[in-house]
Amino acid sequence: MEGNKKRPIRQEQLASVVIRFAGDSGDGIQLTGSQFTDESALVGNDVVTLPNFPAEIRAPAGTIAGVSGFQIHFSSSDIYSPGDRPDVLVALNPAALKLNLKDLKLGGILILNEDAFTPKALSRVGFANNPCQDEKLLSSYRTFVVPITQLTKEALVESGLSAREVERCKNFFVLGLTLWLFGRPTDMTSKWIETKFKNKSELASANAKVLQAGYSYAEATEIFDVSYCVPPAPLEPGRYRNLSGSALTAYGLVSAAQKSGLPLFFASYPITPASELLHELARFKKYGVITFQAEDEIAAMCAIIGASYGGALALTCCSGPGFSLKAEALGLAVMAELPLVVVNVQRAGPSTGLPTKTEQSDLLQAIYGRHGEAPLCVLAASSPSNSFKMAYEACRIATKYMTPVILLSDGYIAMGSEPWKIADPDELSLFEVAFTEVNNNPGGRFLAYKRDEATLARPWVKAGTKDLAHRIGGLEKENETGDVSYDANNHHLMCQLRAEKINRIAQEIPPLSVEGPSDAELLLLGWGGTEGILREALKVCQANKLPVARLHLHYLNPLPSDLKEVLGRFKHILIPELNFGQLRTLIRDKYLVDARGLNRLTGEIFKVEEVVRAVQEML
């Protein structure tokens, strides 16, 4: 029959797409974005995400402060950043449009929820005219004005849900529409809905129905005359999961516990954006992981000192002011020379700052932020996937050198996600932990601070081990015996020994690998979550035949032994950081080189184009 024929739909193949969902914080934007990401990963695309949500728990609805966003970059090739500017913007209300329109590429796709553009909502964010009827706007982009709220209500007219519950389902209409637009099926999301809402059958049924309604609307309506296809990316063969940086940090810590045979004890106090790590680790109870929510950051820090003294792999996490609260107890851990790991998920500061925005401004605090000479090891993850490796490495170094280790992450890494090739346990490096059970001073008392000649680590003894009673604490220790000592020369010696122990970790750091031509004039030097941006920037520079190479640091204290030699090869050094130049200060101080910085603190990551522009200005 003529009426059953499908309308002709043109299909276009694209290499990559950046799509941004934006709406009020109660619109389910994060769920829509994360589910679209999972669907993209399942069809084989490489994906990088950038969630962005309000700092306030519930800002007034319809305001700029209440806008939640989720950006996804999915591609048929390897990608490393969430993309500078979206090709597609889905704006569920005027505030979301107002905040995000400036970033949309000219000629890009703009999808608007017509029902949300009421006179009151427009007035709240300063729109004099309705953008849905703005001819200039409509002609500048491929604009689709869709009555999303009304269509959701029509799909659920017999659902029995309240008006509020019905409206909250509109994010699944958006998801269904965009899944059709990019040629993705709805099967996996439908199964996910069944699992997610298995105890709320009426919501499961409603969301599934709205998802299909959005998909069918896009398929049937003539305003969508083209759909897009992004082929799978040629990823390395293996089993992959799409995981966030927090999840992969947790996986790395649990793997370290399993590999070392140590019980894992994790204590923390909830704080954004570090809290997710506690949530993730709480799921691993079946692997013997013990999680403890302390009454504050100080209690959490002191709890893991006790757990380490008892022989556990002891860990905590924090952000912002929580890191400051741990400072005094970190000094105690340095003095006691106990192995533990502190994960600091950096956010914009100072004070409580911008809790949901990212920054890299705790580097100097991590290295120097304690009273007295209290050096410890500082590492930094550079991506969600790299979080697994660096979390594992932090545990290995801590136990081998009997030292606290700080692992720096940030909000962008922790909340972002990407496909992660599931690690092969047999390929993880071994680090066997052997507790001292025999007196190291036959005929005399046990020497708790008699050190290993190679690492200068003192022996690790489980509290209560027979005949190996020893004293730890915050007062200075006498060399070897560990007795309390007020001798000035002994204090000088012990400070030297603790500093030298940290310096010797450099012998563990693999040789640096510089990406780019050996005759490059400029070195892009980075650390932490800027790696993906700098990798993309290097690709652009190379395409434009600019003499640029790139190096990313994961070991920040001590710095790699060959860093001085590497820096000496380049005429120019540019260090992009989301701070006012903390690594640049360290590099200039230690190596006396004229490193320059690209710095800003806006709570946002760099754009590739601004890094490339800085390179061009420097050459």
Image (cartoon, grey):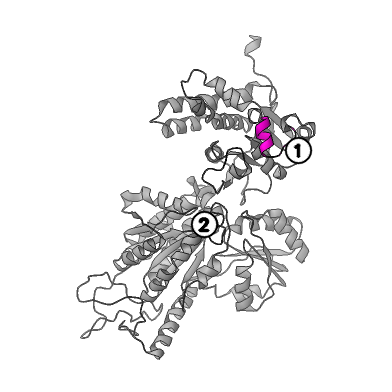
Residue 78 seen from this side:
yes
Q: Which residues are magenta?
A: 118-129
Quick check: is 357 in the magenta stretch?
A: no
Q: Amino acid at mark 2?
A: Asn
Which residue bears the numbered disc 1?
A: 107
Residue 510 at x, y percent in the picture = 52, 69
Between circles 1 and 2, the one closer to the viewer is 1
Quick check: is 127 in the magenta stretch?
A: yes
Q: Residue at x 28, y 77 (%)?
A: 471
In this picture, residue 181 sits left or right of residue 261: right
Quarter that holds the N terminus: top right
Marks 1 & 2, CB-CB < 8 Å contact = no
Chain-order first, disc 1 or disc 2: 1
- 418 is higher (above) or lower (below) than 581: above
Find residue 315 and report its image quarter: bottom left
Which residue bears the numbered disc 2?
A: 386
Residue 510 seen from this side:
no
Q: Amino acid at mark 1?
A: Gly
Quarter that holds the C terminus: bottom right
Look at the numbered disc 1 and give the secondary structure of its residue: loop
Q: Residues within 10 Å of mark 1 (few under 14, many from 20)?
A: some
